[in-house]
Image: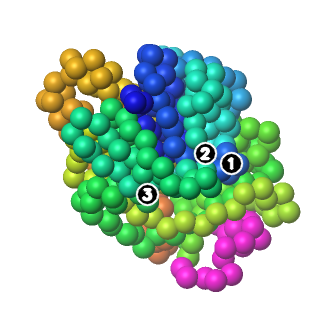
């Protein structure tokens, strides 16, 4: 019997698998996708997550491949409103690392396969999961047919539409926001270099982040239900109209529109089955904290899994874990709501007032440092 089954082979599931494997635990990662992810998707890795990733020996490689964002600029009407530096947020990683999720997953997968070449099973759909008291039974569907495997423990890291969460019937109230965004990656035509830039414009926010290889990500809040707004050309037009910056739509390498939802489970621990990452808490991508939250979930859960396998863990430790991680997710959700509110369209007079208030607050060192720490999850 396997020690731990991890459902979901994304960044969170792979990280947890590596943590457990290097501690001598047998692990199987079950991933529905037959092929690795090639989408840039989430790009920001915050300092606490880099510290966690260092624990499995992959942080240095990711840092060598990524862009170190040490400063964020807030701009409104062509004028710099505020500056936020990340120099003081961490002694080891005083920056937010920008690297495409596809590369992050590839590095994590390589680490897992280096520890156990047979740990990852792709093309596997989980159709059922049952806590039998002394073990967990997981029903699978593959190209070869139906089967069942058993494990001492199971962890669901299978994303916002978690099959395991649904099978458990775990309560997770959903909140849907009116905000929609369009994001795309283009050749970088700016002079921002490794800096992030947030354009606080009356028509809605535009966010801009550097990526490796001379690429820059642009995210714009959509003005409404415009059927023609979901193209590279329309994103380039919104950026130009709101910021004055011209980007070449022909260099677009990724384009995605997304709405915003939040969801927080009532419980992360269900007997021998645990929920982590987006399976437990879905928050707005604005702020880039979701993937990082999942890694920190896994970092805290791994020692408890080792303790349970060794029969030394106490139930109150799992309760403390659950309480702490749900509090962290709720805090991140509140931060993302603030981020979204600051980026919504405003009439001219209110837009001026908002930007002046932001400038005034950013000019107070204590407030600026606190905001930088919140933004980087410290």
Q: Which residues are magenta?
A: 224-244
Q: Which residue is denoted by mark 2 in the rendering?
A: 122
Q: Neighbour class for label 2 at 10 Å: few (<14), some, many (≥20)?
A: some
Looking at the image, is 9 positioned above or below residue 263? Answer: above
**Magenta region includes residue 239:** yes
Q: Which residue is denoted by mark 3 in the rendering?
A: 127
Labelled pair 1, 2 in contact (Cβ < 8 Å): yes
Where disc 1 sits, the SS reads loop
Q: Neighbour class for label 3 at 10 Å: few (<14), some, many (≥20)?
A: some
**Number of the label disc, if any, that sits on residue 35:** 1
> Going from the N terminus, do you reach mark 1 or mark 2 first?
1
> Going from the N terminus, do you reach mark 3 or mark 1 first?
1
Quadrant location, the N terminus: top left
Looking at the image, is 155 positioned above or below residue 61? Answer: below
> Going from the N terminus, do you reach mark 3 or mark 2 first?
2
Looking at the image, is 126 positioned above or below residue 194? Answer: below
Asked whether the viewer can see residue 29, the reply is: yes
Relative horizontal placement of residue 150, taking residue 322 as reference (left or right): right
- Residue under the point 49% across and 17% down: 22
**Magenta region includes residue 50:** no
Snapshot quadrant of residue 238 = bottom right
């Amino acid at each position: 019997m396997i020690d731990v089954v991890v459902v979901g082979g994304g960044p969170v599931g792979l990280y947890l698998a590596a943590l457990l494997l290097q501690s001598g635990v047998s692990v199987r990662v079950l991933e529905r996708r037959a092929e690795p992810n090639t989408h840039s998707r989430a790009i920001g890795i915050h300092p606490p997550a880099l510290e966690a990733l260092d624990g499995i020996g992959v942080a240095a490689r990711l840092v060598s491949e990524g862009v170190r964002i040490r400063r964020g600029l807030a701009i409104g009407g062509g004028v710099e409103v505020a500056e936020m530096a990340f120099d003081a947020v961490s002694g080891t990683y005083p920056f937010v690392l920008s690297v495409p999720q596809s590369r992050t997953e590839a590095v994590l997968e390589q680490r897992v396969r280096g520890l156990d070449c047979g740990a990852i099973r792709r093309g596997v759909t989980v159709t059922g999961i049952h806590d039998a008291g002394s073990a967990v039974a997981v029903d699978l569907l593959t190209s070869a047919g139906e089967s069942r495997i058993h494990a001492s423990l199971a962890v669901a890291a299978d994303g916002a539409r978690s099959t395991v969460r649904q099978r458990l019937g775990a309560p997770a109230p959903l909140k849907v926001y009116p905000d929609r965004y369009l994001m795309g990656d283009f050749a970088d035509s700016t002079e921002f270099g490794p800096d992030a830039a947030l354009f606080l414009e009356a028509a809605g926010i535009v966010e801009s982040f550097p990526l490796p290889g001379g690429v820059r990500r642009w995210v714009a809040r959509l003005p409404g239900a415009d059927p023609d707004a979901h193209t590279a050309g329309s994103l380039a037009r919104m950026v130009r109209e709101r910021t004055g910056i011209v980007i070449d739509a022909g260099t677009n390498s990724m384009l995605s529109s997304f709405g915003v939802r939040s969801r927080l489970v009532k419980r992360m621990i269900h007997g021998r089955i645990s929920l982590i990452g987006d399976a437990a808490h879905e928050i707005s991508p604005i702020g880039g904290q979701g993937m990082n939250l999942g890694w920190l979930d896994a970092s805290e859960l791994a020692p408890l899994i080792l303790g349970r396998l060794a029969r030394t863990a106490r139930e109150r430790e799992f309760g403390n874990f659950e309480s702490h991680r749900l509090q962290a997710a709720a805090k991140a959700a509140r931060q993302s709501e603030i981020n979204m509110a600051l980026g919504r369209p405003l009439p001219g007079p209110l837009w001026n007032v908002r930007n002046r208030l932001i400038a005034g607050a950013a000019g107070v060192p204590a407030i600026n440092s606190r905001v930088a720490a919140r933004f980087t999850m410290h």
